[in-house]
Each structure stands twice: as C-alpha cells, then as structure tokens.
Image: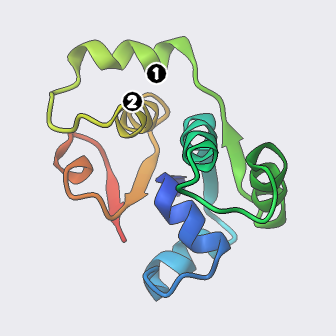
Amino acid sequence: MNILLDTHIFLWYITKDKRLSPRILDTIRHIDNRVYLSVVSLWEITIKYQLGRLPLPQSPEIFIPEQRKRHHISHLDLDEASVGHLVNLPEIHRDPFDRMLICQAIQHNLILVTTDTDIQEYPLQTLPA
C-alpha cells in the first residue's frame, strides 16, 4: 500500500501523539507499505513554525527531513501533473495545503491518511485516522 500522510498525521506520528490510532500506527510501520510526506506539508509546517504556532526542537528545514529519514518516510515533490488536478477539484475544502495533498494523492494513486472529514468527501482513497 502506498500512503500519503496528512501534515497533522506526520506530526502526531513523530511525536507519539496518543490521538494516532493503533491501526494507523501499524499501517505506517508495516514493512510492505510505502509512506510519503509531501513537500507541501513541509511548506505548511514551516509557515506555522514561522508564525509561532508550531514549536519544534529545531528549524523545520533541518528537523522535518531528519524525522522523515529516521522514520523511513519518503519525500514527495510537488509536480505539474498534481497541480493540474486543481482545476477539476470540487470546492469542498478551502485549505490550499489540503487541496494540494488531495491532488497529489489523486495523481500518484496514494491513500491519504487524515482525520479531516472534509478531505474524506473527495473522490480519492483515504484512510481515516
């Protein structure tokens, strides 16, 4: 299974947050699954860090790649084909970061792991956390 972590799921995972269900933990850790974190999530984390809304032990450009590597999570770059899905994406969700994650999941046939019920209304595979 190829999965894309929503930003909050990644943050919960690396901080061992209790809101992450055992089922999702098992899915992320399963050796046969390929787990991705989008550069879009790094962008979102960086903005929240700069605004003082997300404390981190190090600056995000250092901390996030280190955590990704430590937890065997692959990076996913933003590509033109993914952005192209925006034109046909229904206006269910207004958050631009989430909309891009949706587009990437559609383009790359990834299962998006999220607790966001608005995202779960889109025509893509999700794994509700």
Label tally = 2
Q: Position of residue 16 (x, y in %)?
A: 61, 82
Visible residue check, residue 30: no
| Residue 75 lies in quadrant | top right
Q: How far is the residue under mark 2 from the one under mark 1?
A: 5 Å
- Name the amino acid type tagged 2: Cys
Whether tag 2 and tag 1 are in contact, CB under 8 A, the answer is: yes
Whichever of callouts 2 and 1 sits on the residue coming sooner in the sequence is 1
- Residue drawn at (42%, 51%) of the image: 111
Q: Report the disc number at residue 72.
A: none
Q: Position of residue 70 (x, y in %)?
A: 83, 65
Residue 91 sits above or below residue 53 on the image? above
Residue 79 sits above or below residue 112 on the image? above
Q: Which residue is mark 2?
A: 103
Q: Residues within 10 Å of mark 1 (few under 14, many from 20)?
A: some
- Name the amino acid type tagged 1: Ser
Indicate the secondary structure of the residue bearing disc 2. helix
Left or right: where 54 falls relative to 21: right
Q: Which residue is mark 1?
A: 82
Image quarter of the C terminus: bottom left
- Residue drawn at (52%, 55%) of the image: 53
